[in-house]
Amino acid sequence: MSRFASFREFYPFYLNEHSNRTSRRLHFIGSCGALLLVAWAIVDGNAWWLLGALVCGYAFAWIGHFFFEKNKPATFKHPFYSFAGDWVMFRDIVTGRIPF
């Protein structure tokens, strides 16, 4: 995997790594679950739910990669860009730019 000078350079690579529709759906479901758990952490006042949010988001995403994409998550080599990519792709799915 090459180095990327910016997120703008990274995002097309990220989308290529998420070409499988089932994998994208799993990412989306994991992100929704993570958002719900973050909200619950705020409502409940218990920061442990934030750990659940991380586990939920990454578990769904990694299942998508290992079983449907058959590739390694970009998180292992580009953790910050990958995290940002998850949320940009989430937005792109919500807005219809990327098919769900």
Image (cartoon, rainbow, N blue to C red):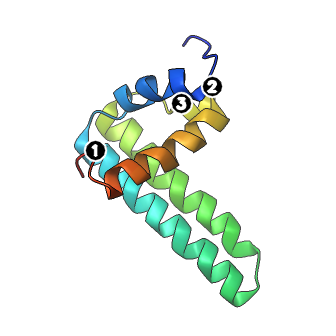
Question: Dot 3 lies on which element?
Answer: helix
Q: Nearer the viewer, mark 1 or mark 2?
A: 1
State whether residue 44 is above or below residue 95. below
Q: Residues within 10 Å of mark 2 (few under 14, many from 20)?
A: few
Looking at the picture, which amino acid does disc 1 mark?
Ile
- Residue appearing at x 66%, y 37% in the figure: 80
Residue picked out by circle 3: 74
Looking at the picture, which amino acid does disc 3 mark?
Ala
Question: Dot 1 lies on which element?
Answer: loop
**Closer-to-camera residue (79/99):** 99
Residue picked out by circle 1: 98
The quarter of the rendered structure image containing the N terminus is: top right
Residue picked out by circle 2: 77
For marks 3 and 2, give the CA distance: 6 Å
Q: Residues within 10 Å of mark 3 (few under 14, many from 20)?
A: some
Question: Dot 2 lies on which element?
Answer: loop
Mark 1 or mark 2: whose residue is earlier in sequence: 2
For marks 1 and 2, give the CA distance: 24 Å
- Residue appearing at x 60%, y 34% in the figure: 81
For marks 1 and 3, give the CA distance: 19 Å
Rendering quarter of residue 40: bottom right
Mark 1 or mark 3: whose residue is earlier in sequence: 3
x, y percent for residue 50: 69, 68
Whether the residues at callouts 3 and 2 have beta carbons within 8 Å, the answer is yes
Left or right: where does residue 28 sit relative to residue 47? left
- Residue appearing at x 57%, y 10% in the figure: 2
